[in-house]
């Protein structure tokens, strides 16, 4: 009888031990091809063919050739699609849920908190005009009026109220951002219709609707997952509702904001600044209008989760445990599409494919 096959569609360096442990449980661990990271119909068909006999798919991000409905429908014995990272926008979650296939992910502390820390760094760089000051000193200029920066927190001496930071999304990353902002004595508001009121209260964050957040915030920072609801949720109409000079930060997913509208608003001075780490198309095309914007825009190569320590290794180790649980007939502890659990239990619950 052939071993249950696990297809690692996007391998990650430094995870050999995790894969060896899966092999020790009796699984056939097969690595995907590097070319699958390049977009193309041929690659999608190749992944579907490779996944046909798989009981589990796992890996890091593969946005160039996503785990599509075609791949999922080609895998009749598939139990789980498991990501090492937080985002699952490169997996057709709806197709998986329809078939009782669990989509699992890795919202680890190192990943989520690194994004939060980078968000604060980008926010401060824009509010304190770090790029502009640096460029002017290098050009021989000194202490100009344009170097005046924003004071963040409330002041007792003159009653200055401090700025308002609006968080779109109050999950792990958004909550951590609010924690890091707490010592600054500024106001934090957030929009997240999927988080209970108690979470806002515990975070010390005011709960508001999206339009109120747009109107009141001096800084708007996006921390939501990409879905039909959040896709292009910040464009020309939303920009028109913001205060003049508002700063926008996107360390979530590129397709949540309209890059053309943001570029136009920066050129016109309608927005005071922006920092973008995730883009509609990656790598950022050379002809993107964002490249022509000056020091009011900070561009980052989708790297806010990247650190000099373990990066996604903790997520990969979690993924290994998750896959073993799913193949042993147990529901993993990192299921993203919880609506699929009931059907998954009917199909696979209690059926152990491992040898240990």
Image (cartoon, rainbow, N blue to C red):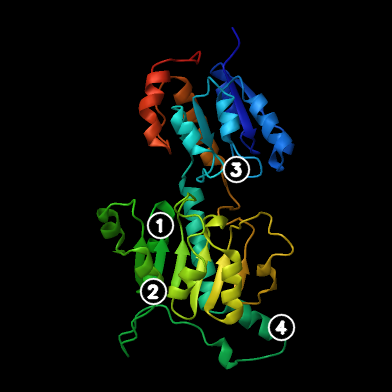
Which quadrant is home to the N terminus?
A: top right
Ranked by sequence position, the earlier of labels 4 and 2 is: 4
Q: How far apart, in angstroms, are the residues tagged by discs 3 and 1? A: 21 Å
Q: Secondary structure at mark 3?
A: loop
Task: Name the residue beneath numbered marker 1.
Answer: 169
Task: Name the residue beneath numbered marker 3.
Answer: 61
| Marks 4 and 2 in Cβ contact (< 8 Å) | no
Ranked by sequence position, the earlier of labels 1 and 2 is: 1
Above-or-below relation of 11 to 200: above
| Marks 3 and 1 in Cβ contact (< 8 Å) | no
Ranked by sequence position, the earlier of labels 3 and 4 is: 3
Ranked by sequence position, the earlier of labels 3 and 2 is: 3
- Nearer the viewer's eye, disc 4 or disc 2? 2
Q: How far apart, in angstroms, are the residues tagged by discs 3 and 2? A: 34 Å
Q: Secondary structure at mark 1?
A: loop
- Nearer the viewer's eye, disc 3 or disc 2? 2
Task: Name the residue beneath numbered marker 2.
Answer: 215
- Nearer the viewer's eye, disc 3 or disc 4? 3
Ranked by sequence position, the earlier of labels 1 and 4 is: 4
Q: Which mark is residue 138?
A: 4
Q: How far apart, in angstroms, are the residues tagged by discs 1 and 2? A: 17 Å
Q: Secondary structure at mark 4?
A: helix
């Amino acid at each position: 009888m052939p071993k249950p096959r696990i297809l690692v569609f996007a391998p990650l360096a430094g995870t050999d031990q995790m894969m060896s442990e899966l092999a020790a449980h009796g699984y056939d661990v097969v690595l995907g091809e590097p070319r699958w990271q390049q977009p193309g119909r041929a690659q999608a068909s190749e992944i579907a063919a490779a996944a046909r006999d798989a009981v589990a798919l796992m890996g890091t991000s593969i946005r160039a050739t996503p785990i599509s409905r075609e791949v999922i429908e080609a895998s009749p014995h598939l139990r789980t699609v498991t990501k090492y990272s937080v985002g699952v926008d490169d997996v057709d979650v709806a197709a998986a849920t329809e078939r009782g296939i669990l989509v699992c992910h890795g919202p680890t502390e190192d990943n989520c908190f690194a994004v939060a820390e980078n968000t604060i760094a980008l926010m401060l760089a824009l509010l304190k005009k770090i790029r502009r000051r640096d460029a002017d000193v290098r050009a021989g200029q000194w202490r100009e009026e344009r170097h005046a920066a924003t004071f963040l927190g409330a002041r007792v001496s003159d009653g200055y109220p401090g700025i308002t930071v609006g968080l779109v999304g109050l999950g792990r990353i958004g909550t951590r951002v609010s924690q890091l902002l707490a010592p600054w004595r500024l106001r934090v508001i957030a929009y997240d219709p999927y988080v209970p009121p108690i979470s806002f209260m515990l975070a010390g964050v005011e709960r508001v609707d999206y339009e109120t957040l747009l109107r009141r915030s001096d800084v708007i920072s996006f921390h939501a997952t990409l879905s039909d609801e959040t896709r292009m949720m910040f464009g020309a109409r939303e920009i028109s509702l913001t205060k003049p000079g508002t700063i926008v930060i996107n360390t979530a997913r590129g397709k949540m904001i309209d890059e053309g509208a943001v570029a136009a608003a920066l050129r016109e001075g309608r927005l005071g600044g922006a920092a973008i780490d995730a883009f509609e198309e990656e790598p950022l095309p050379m002809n993107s209008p964002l490249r022509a914007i000056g020091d009011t825009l900070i561009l980052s190569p989708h790297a806010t989760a990247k650190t000099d320590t373990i990066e996604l290794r903790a997520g990969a180790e979690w993924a290994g445990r998750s896959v073993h649980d799913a193949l042993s007939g147990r529901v993993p502890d990192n299921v993203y599409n919880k609506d699929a659990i009931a059907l998954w239990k009917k199909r696979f619950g209690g059926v152990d494919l491992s040898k240990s």
